[in-house]
Amino acid sequence: MKEVILCIVFVIACTFPAALSAEDRVNACSVLTHAEAEEAAGVQLAEGQLTEYEAIFMQGVTLCHFESRDPMQYKNFVSVQLTVGESREDAAQKFDEAVYLILSPEDIEGFGDKAVWGGDVFQPKGGLHVLRDGYYFAVKVNRADGKDNLANSRMLAERILERLRSEDR
């Protein structure tokens, strides 16, 4: 009987792909380097902290947050939220839901399939939301001086898109 149960467990384990942790697959911290985040923020940042969401409606979503090392510069940070959709349609739906919350969305040309800049109650200074194939990501650069948040978000978005292209190969 024990052998039958072990055999069933083995067959089930081989039938379903193993769930990969965020460290084993593309995630928000794997698409951006610490040095790139510091360049955009203009201050020294701590290493990126990865958050992998467990809520059913947040499956496939990871967040990487780089915060200032200097407590006096706490307003300076970089964050990337990456959604790996189950399909192109899934990623597009999540992108559309996020854009719906943006108060005054501004279309940005030249990034992925669609890109929008704008703020909501969670990102009052704005964030760059990008949809590309089965990926949706939002990148936010918050400099205390407010200078070039969009320009720096665009710079990081270009690098993220390059890494996502190499993931597809």
Image: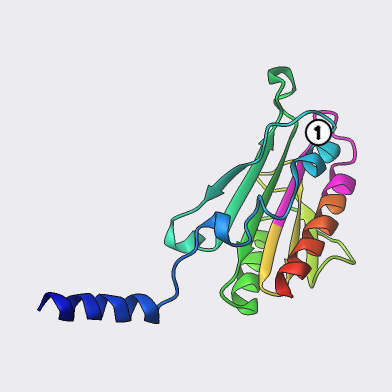
Left or right: 157 as drawn, with respect to 124:
right
Badge 1 marks a residue whose secondary structure is loop
Q: Does the magenta stretch include residue 139?
A: yes
Write down the residue under mark 1. 143
Residue drawn where x is 86% and y is 62% of the image = 108
The amino acid marked with disc number 1 is: Arg
In the image, residue 41 sits, relative to residue 5, either above or below, namely above
Q: Which residue lies furthest to the left in this view?
A: 1
Residue 30 lies in the magenta-colored region: no
Quarter that holds the N terminus: bottom left
| Along the line of sight, the residue nearer the viewer: 15 or 156 | 15
Q: In this view, does 58 lie above or below 167?
A: above
- Image check: 138 left or right of 107? left
Query: From what the image shows, is residue 34 above or below residue 2?
Result: above
Query: Could you tell me which residue is drawn at 56 percent across and 59 percent down?
Result: 24
* Front-most of residues 27 and 126: 27
> Count of labels shown?
1
Coloration of the structure image? rainbow
The region drawn magenta spans 138-153
Q: Quadrant of the C terminus?
A: bottom right
Q: How far from the left and from the top, in percent, is residue 121?
A: 64, 44
Q: Quadrant of residue 161?
A: bottom right
From the top left corner, tell me how far across and down residue 109 is, in percent. 89, 66
Q: Which of 142 and 23 is in front in this view?
A: 23
Q: Position of residue 136 (x, y in %)?
A: 68, 64
Q: Where is residue 150 in the image (x, y as percent from the top left)?
A: 86, 47
Identify the residue at horizontal 38%, vertical 79% (top origin): 14
